[in-house]
Image: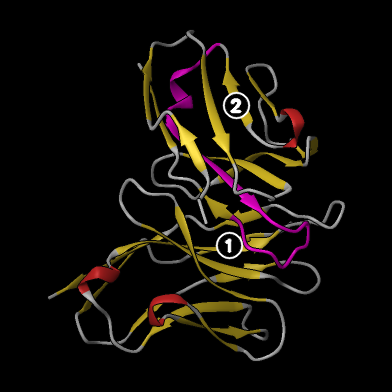
């Protein structure tokens, strides 16, 4: 079965420091991996995705993620955190294929708190 | 480009009452999803449409939940009768192409409280 795990409920980091939000996955076949961010009372916003190719994927707002096949991980990173990055982050994997589509399976989310 | 529109934003009902949510996806998006997000958890897919056909409704509690997508555009999700455990945010999302690589775009959600 496809699954995603985000081992940290919350990550705290000081503004200007690098941040990492962890994600590991379990999927049969080639993984299609996504990161979304959710601000309070808002829907999920797409940040970036890994489909194939370069293991380092760059996305919106200066975020990037590193795909590691051997460790089945897809950690979200940013070199210098901003207070405005404080939000709830979700990792997701594309699930079993039915008719060329598949549902997104989400992790439980990690709250990122960036302090001034 | 207009995003995914959902209404209402908030709804409070008593248990055993019925409720309906509406979603208008991004123009031209063939795939539409309804997700349930319970507080403290990640979103869980309830139902997925491709145009006006159902692709996946394996996690939809069909004894009380129903959804339709007439004409392959707007969609309605209904709960009848509601239970306390249905309190959650209901997210609608759409995607342009029916491939595994396409990202989904989400609406702001409807926050349902069942009392």
Quadrant of the snapshot with the C terminus of chain B? top left
The label on residue B77 is 2
Tell me the magenta residue range. Answer: B81-104
At mark 1, the secondary structure is: strand
Q: Residue at 64% across / 33% down in the picture?
A: B74
In the image, taking residue A95 as reference, residue B13 lies left or right, namely left
At mark 2, the secondary structure is: strand
In the image, taking residue B43 as reference, residue A37 lies left or right, namely left
Q: Do we see residue B90 in this rendering?
A: no
The chain under label 2 reads B
| Residue B28 x %, y % | 69, 50
Q: Looking at this view, is B85 or A38 the one in front?
A: A38
Identify the residue at the far top of this view.
B16
Q: Looking at this view, is B53 or A34 the one in front?
A: B53
Q: Is residue B89 above or below residue B26?
A: above
Q: Badge 2 local density, few (<14 within 10 Å), some, or many (20+)? A: some
Q: Residue at 51% across / 11% down in the picture?
A: B18
Identify the residue at the far right of this view.
A99
Q: Residue at 31% across / 87% down in the picture?
A: A18
Look at mark 1 in the image and give the residue it sits on: A92
């Amino acid at each position: 079965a496809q699954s995603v795990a985000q081992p940290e409920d919350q990550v705290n980091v000081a503004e200007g420091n690098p941040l990492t939000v962890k994600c590991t996955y379990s999927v049969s076949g080639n993984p299609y991996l996504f990161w979304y961010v959710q601000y309070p009372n808002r829907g999920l916003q797409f940040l970036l995705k890994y489909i194939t190719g370069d293991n380092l994927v760059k996305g919106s707002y200066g975020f990037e993620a590193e795909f590691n096949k051997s460790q089945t991980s897809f950690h979200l990173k940013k070199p210098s955190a901003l207070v405005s990055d404080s939000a709830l982050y979700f990792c997701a994997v594309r699930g079993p294929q039915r008719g060329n589509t598949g549902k997104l399976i989400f992790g439980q989310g990690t709250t990122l708190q960036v302090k001034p | 480009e207009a995003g995914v529109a959902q209404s209402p934003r908030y709804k409070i009902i008593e248990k055993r009452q019925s409720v309906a949510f509406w979603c208008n996806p991004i123009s031209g998006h063939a795939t539409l999803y309804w997700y349930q997000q319970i507080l403290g958890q990640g979103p869980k897919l309830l139902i997925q449409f491709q145009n006006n056909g159902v692709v996946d409704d394996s996690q939809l509690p069909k004894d009380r939940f129903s959804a339709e997508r007439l004409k392959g555009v707007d969609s309605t999700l209904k709960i009848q009768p509601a239970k306390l455990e249905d309190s959650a945010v209901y997210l609608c999302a759409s995607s342009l192409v029916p491939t595994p690589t396409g990202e989904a775009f989400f609406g702001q959600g409807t926050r349902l409280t069942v009392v």
